[in-house]
Image (cartoon, grey):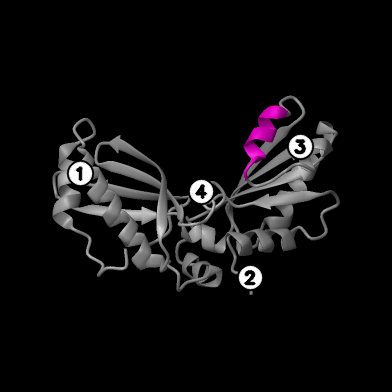
Amino acid sequence: MKKKFILTTVILLAVFLLGACSLQLYSRTALHEELLEHMYQKYGIEFSIYRYHNRGSGSYLLEVYPTGGDPVYDIAHLSWRGNQSTGEYSISDTFFGVLIREEVETEITNLLSDFPIPFRVFYPTTIAYFNNIFDSTKNLNDFLTWRLDYPYWGFDITVVLSLNNLDEADAYANLVFDSISGSAFSGLFTVVVLPEEGFVRLTRTNKDALIVEYHGQTATIGRNILRSVRSE
């Protein structure tokens, strides 16, 4: 894969023109190769494909992860979109979220450092598509600086609480929201309450399954925190 970076416009446009119903194996393979090369040039590491989706209407999605890594833990989305009338296309991805995930989760954890009950913070890496300037040379601080000029861009964060009494869920959720308001991390925050016996089993990869397993013993409360202020 360590070849000179060339996104072959003819191949990509041909794939788009073939459409969802007539996508041929060669064209799909060629598209996959070019998209993986794009990721290699952007991040300096090789990626493998976990799954792919031809969504039609000039839209194609790859689920990718660093080669040798965990296809669930480090999954990211890589999107190709084409415009049949103009022949133009765009490529975007969510992998920068994987690079900053640990730091984002640490920052949110620090904001909640005085929280009175156990909690975990999770930042998903398949939701937000970042501006293409954010590659392996950038970090969270670079992104927060950029975001001052683009306040509409919001984080999507889940905070899971260990709580057996659902009657207290709203009060604790509001405490989470109040602790985060005014920080650099505005966006959609979701508080999920799990009973203690489920919380102790909680991992990044089994969170959704535990919510299903403990149906009736959980609560989910969301709030869009709009204000974004750069914290130094």
Q: Is residue 70 above or below residue 217?
A: below
- The amino acid at mark 2 is Ser
Separation of residues labelled 1 and 3 (CA atoms)? 47 Å
Magenta stretch: give its range: 205-213
Q: Give the structural element (helix, strand or loop) at label 2.
A: loop
Q: How far is mark 4 from mark 2, CA to CA?
A: 34 Å
Q: Earlier in the sequence, mark 3 or mark 2?
A: 3
* Residue with the mark numbered 4: 71
Closer mark to the observer between disc 1 and disc 3: 1
The x, y position of residue 220, in whole percent, is: 68, 35
Circle 3 sits on which residue? 194
Q: Amino acid at mark 1?
A: Tyr
193 and 137: which one is in front?
137
- Three-letter amino acid code at the position of disc 4: Pro
Q: Quadrant of residue 155?
A: bottom right
Does residue 210 appear left or right of residue 123 in this picture?
right
Q: Nearer the viewer, mark 3 or mark 4?
A: 4
Query: Label 3 amino acid?
Result: Leu
Residue labelled with disc 1:
26
Q: Which residue is mark 2?
A: 231
- Can you name the residue that lies furthest to the top here? 216
Quadrant of the rendering where the C terminus is positioned? bottom right
